[in-house]
Image: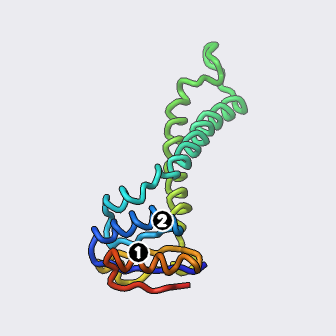
Amino acid sequence: MRGIVGVFSELDSTVDAITELKKLRVGDVTVYSPTPRHELDDVLRHGPSVVRRFTLIGALVGVTFGYWIPIWVSDYWPLVVGGKPIASWVPYTIIGFEVMVLIGSLATVAGLFINARIPRITQTVGYDPRFSDGSFGIWVECRPDEQETVRRVLTEKGAEEVHGER
């Protein structure tokens, strides 16, 4: 799909352009910033990260295996001591907790890589090396009939350069 890229030197004009584009609902907006800025987060209004679901699922799987493995080992090679139960949950809580933390943290890292699309196999459309040097960029993926509106909005809001990309 085609889109329009706008290059901005100031944060305020970038925020104004994003606000106007969101009002017009012209297409999917991607913002490039040299540093993380809370102003951009506020205007883009992203919801909570889905990485936390990876953490929860990994932690639940980890605690399940953390209890299951020693219980299975105790049942497979029983050590009967003074009438105590062979498989008791109390001593296995430490193992369950440690495996929960291990698998939960590995799942968090995996979720981070999956959601960040790392490694990125295809080239990022709309990216310009100036966006790492101090300029802000807005990539708007839009239909051909909306491109003129997007160009006008980006230019009016103070874009230094506006050009189309594929």
**Residue that numbered label 1 is attached to:** 153
- Name the one closer to the observer, 139 or 143: 143
Mark 1 residue element:
helix
Q: Badge 1 local density, few (<14 within 10 Å), some, or many (20+)?
A: some
Q: Is residue 28 left or right of residue 79?
A: left
Label ID, residue 101: none
Quick check: can you spot residue 61?
A: yes
- Gap in angstroms between the C-alphas marked 2 and 1: 10 Å
163 versus 13 height, above or below:
below
Mark 2 residue element:
helix
Indicate the quadrant where residue 42 lies.
bottom left
Amino acid type of the residue tagged 1 in the rendering: Val
Quadrant placement of the C terminus: bottom right
Q: Is residue 19 left or right of residue 81?
A: left
Q: Give the residue at the far top of this rendering.
A: 83
Label ID, residue 24: 2
Q: Are marks 2 and 1 in contact (CB under 8 Å)?
A: yes
Q: Is residue 110 left or right of residue 31?
A: right
